[in-house]
Amino acid sequence: MLKLTLRSLTDNWIRFVLTSLAVVLGVSFVVASFMITDSLRSVFGDLAGEINAGKDLIVRGSVEFGDRENDTPPVSQDLLAQIADVDGVSLVEGSIFQFGVVPVAPDGDAVETQGPLSGINWSDQPSLSQLKMIEGEPPRAVDEFALEPDTIDEYDFVIGDEYTVVTPALGPKVFRLTGAFQFGLDEDASVGALISAFAPETAQDVLGYPDAWQEIWIAVDDGAVDEVTAAIEPLLPADAEVVTGEASQEEFSDGFETFLGPFRTVMLVFAVIIAFVSAFLIYNTFNIVLGQRIRELGLLRAIGASGRQVSSSVLIEGLVVGVAATLVGLLGGYGAALGIQALFGAFGADFPEGPLPLALRTAIVAAVVGVGFTLLASILPAYKASTIPPIAALAEGVGARESTGRSRTIIGIIVAVLGIAFTALGLFGSFDDTAPQLLSLGVGALIVFIATAILSPLFAGPAARFLGSRVVGVLFIIIGPLLVLGGVAASVAGIVFAITEAPAAIALSVLGLLVVYAGWSALASGLSSFRLPGVLGRKNASENPQRTATTAIALTIGVALVTTVTVVGTSLKDSFRASIDTGVTADFIFTDESFSGLSAALADDVASMEEIGANSAGRSGNVLVDGSQRGIDAYQFDAIGELLDFDVSEGDLDPTGVLVFREVFEEEGYRLDQGLELTFQSGDQITTPIVGVFDDNGLASDLLVDLSVFEANTDGTADDFVLARIADGVDGERARSAVESVTAAFPGTRVEDRSEFLDRQESNLDNVLAIVNVFLLVAVIIALIGIINTLTLSVFERTREIGLMRAVGMSRTQTVNMIRWEAAIVALFGAVIGTIIGLVFGWAITLAVPDDFIDRTAIPVPSLIQFLVVAAVIGMLAAYFPARRASRMKVLDAIAHS
Amino acid sequence: MTDQATLTTSAARSVGATKIYGEGDTRVVALEDVTVDFQQGRFTAIMGPSGSGKSTLMHCMAGLDTLSRGQVFIGEIELGQLSEQQLTLLRRDYVGFVFQAFNLVPTLNAMENITLPMTLAGRDPDQAWLDEVINTVGLADRTTHRPNELSGGQQQRVAVARALASQPQIIFADEPTGNLDSRTGAEILTFMRHAVDALGQTIVMVTHDPVAASYSDRVVFLADGHTVDELLEPTSDSVYDKMRELGD
């Protein structure tokens, strides 16, 4: 039996390869996602170890709650002297690390990197600071600084020359570059971040820690950690704490894990989607092959094989496919991981390129996905095989048991209800944690797709008749030439660009040619829809509704997901645009390019401009209110009314109190004028009256206070943004150039008007959507393979029929168009169902997401049309091999085929 | 025979037709220097034991297979000169086929199957002729049935009707009764005979059944790739005798 199974695989190796390919893609994705996250973790783990190397104890400002950010309370520098005197302390050093330090390169532009731009104090105790000069001298004087060699090389800084450096506390100032230092004591150590080092006292001033440190690092004599800790604790003020170096390292790793976790989750979600789609493909292939081998299997039964033996032969075939695909997938995953690293690199994100380790866990998960999903997909076909009666060997038209329409409907509806229930629970149910919520949503969505697979054969017939009709044919006739033109344009553009961007240009040209082919096919098959080949293609699709539906399901899933993402993304953009339109009245929005905050000096300079009217700086953070963490925003209340509209419905913008977002206000049962106790991260506690309620929090979070209140209770010095309005009577152009001359002194500052601000936010979102869609494209490629596979099998199945038609006068072109039209129908069917499901999913998600983010459902019609056209192109491309095979069939062999 | 050959024009003929499969050890000569003529308006049977080359001869004459050497003609058209596309058009316009089994496209009904070659060519069938053919085959009330709703005999009649409908130069039938019981087979053969007599059609039929051959005007015997004999106005007994004679 085993021998027979293996023989059947080797004899049909093309089918075997195509089926396996889908699983290989799924496994590759799983492997790649684990490899990349493992690699990132090891890179950052090494970094965490390096940063904390040599530090036995660390004294630092404590935060009351939430994440440790840079705005922690400073530690008095007097404390350092006291600690130095403690018995058992061998070394002490103060340290500051602060974002927002931007050197201006020799060419006059602020240096720009995707990584953080930061500043530190120079230290002469390398065992604690891990700093080492490799060229020149350390910065000693007030006006000196040093850089790491990578930055010096990249921007052509010259040691000994003077440069402007923008610092968070003092803004732009001129410093002399004294030398190059590196972080880490090993050869060639590099952090990949851009760091400026200053003399210790200078660092305290420019980084916003006057007469204070951010952390005090302590090395102790052997075994003295506990003793020294005990001695230091009494010395500390209430807002400081002492922790061990190991604890700090762990915090660092945990912090990284909170970034890595979601990343890995997203990758795994894609992997599961791909594996899921692959499972459908395998199921479909096995099912069709079973139909073709029915006589062979009937013969096996007739000569004494048991039903169990027949079904296990199918399962073994699944197992072999699964194992082979897993092995290839492990290799493919390595390649994919390299590709993803490159992809992120291409999007400008500096991806730390560590080695790509293959952990045992990765291999196990790959096997579970690869072998598990394949076996799962072969269970039903295997059961079906066992029901083939021996008489099938002899008689025509005797097959395996098929489920009737009635039972299919009932089962389908039950599954659909189950799927919708899970999805709805995930969307609208209340959960303590997001993980089970997302799980419920995801499982629900998968079940909905299974229900679609069960139910869609019921209407695939009529749907195929419509999709194969002349109406659609006319659409194809219109789209075809357009695609040809577009494809030619893309190819030509690719050739033109080939000089500068070779790989992208080649890809564009190839893509263009594929589109030209698809367009030509669309035209030809659209024309054929008026003639017999089209009619036959339509009949083939509509009279095998089960096959049409299951072939299309992979595309359905891909299109549904892309549509969902697009609907949600467009709704988000529209909501955002609307809230900016109604909520922002400022003419200029100042932000910084490196997420490290704006120098407070900028707000002062802007305020002093005569071209500027109302203006305000803005900062945001978190506070603890009645035990729950709330977002808080701070503006200058005297001006913000002219810049932003929070839709204050009760009370007013009174700088002596706090305003609360309507939803929170009602949820918590607050009253106006009641005192609210706010605990800031610094530990400061204030009780302040509720002076108003605002209804629009598109631009704010839960609470709103005057900037002075916020500043008094937090330790940060940087603004998150600055808003300004042009003074009355001042020309917009003049104001703009005046503003730009001010920001020129603050390198790394971005100034935008409303529409520029909006466009940038939108393009950020578009980039995210594009990356998501690139990943979903993998699912669509599997769908393509699925259609190729099924059509090839169906051509094989109809060998005699095709041979007969060729004998009585069907030309090769007519044969090709018959297959093409069938492929077009299958692809359109999948895409249309997918679009419908995607619209419903998208609509449900926009309802479920809080109105702060999405308050409307957009239906992106142009995108949906695009998806349908892409589906048609996929159908045309998928038809290539099967159509070629059908038209090249030797007529005589085909007739003789039994 | 010579009289008839000169009196009637040929619908199809082969000149020195040779077909060789494989090379070296696996080399098989299926046809060797076969020169044969099929006259218009006649019903010819090709007979011979398995491996005699009778099917190969028919396939090559119908443009389904190509010769290794020699020539075949449909009317005055030499098939060896034709491209794949031209062969397709030739089959569509000049040749009709009836196979032993699987003659019909399952997704098309009887009428659609009958008009298939004309639909493929984008031509409208001659309605009067079509009606006559359908009436002759006795399928007037079955035209909208799918092949799986027809009996084996009805399916073969549809196949014959399809072959006749486009009024081809010649019809090739490959064991058309091979899958039928003798009564249904006789019906089909009678009908083919009628098509020749009443409608003036030319039919070449490959068979190994002497009874089937007895419906023809002339039987050509093949053995080992050669034409070995022929029989005019055959009866089943004369065919049997000839077969026995050739078998010795």
Image: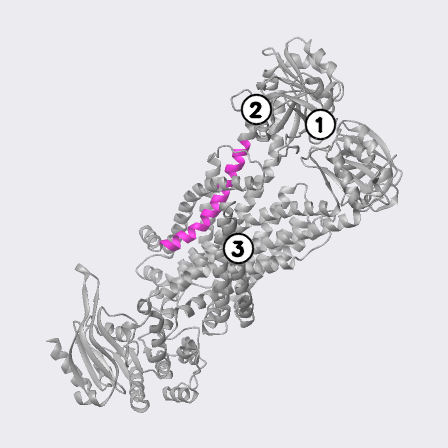
Chain of the residue under label 3: A
Residue A167 — which label?
Answer: 1
Q: Which residues are magenta?
A: A13-41
Asked if the magenta segment contains residue A36, the reply would be yes
Give the amino acid type for the residue marked by disc 3 in the picture: Ala
Above or below, comparing residue A190 to residue A389 in the picture: above
Spatial CA distance of label 3 from label 1 is 47 Å
Q: Are marks 3 and 2 on the same chain?
A: yes
- The overriding secondary structure of the stretch rendered in magenta is helix
Which residue is identified by label 3? Answer: A490
Specify few, some or many for label 2: CA neighbours under 10 Å numbering under 14, 14-19, or 20 or more.
Answer: some
Above or below, comparing residue A265 to residue B180 in the picture: above
Foreground mark, 2 or 1, reads 1
Q: Residue B203, how many percent across, how many down?
A: 28, 83
Could you say which is closer to the camera, residue A117 or residue A788?
A117
Residue shown at the point (58%, 43%) measured from the top left? A266
Q: Residue A35, how many percent across, how many down?
A: 50, 37
Chain of the residue under label 1: A
Spatial CA distance of label 3 from label 2 is 49 Å
Give the amino acid type for the residue marked by disc 1 in the picture: Thr
User: In the structure shown, which secondary structural element does the residue marked by tag 1 occupy?
Assistant: strand
Nearer-N-terminus badge (3/2): 2
Which residue is identified by label 2? Answer: A49
Above or below, comparing residue A282 to residue B118 in the picture: above
Residue A434 — which label?
Answer: none
Q: Residue A748, how many percent across, how many down?
A: 69, 34
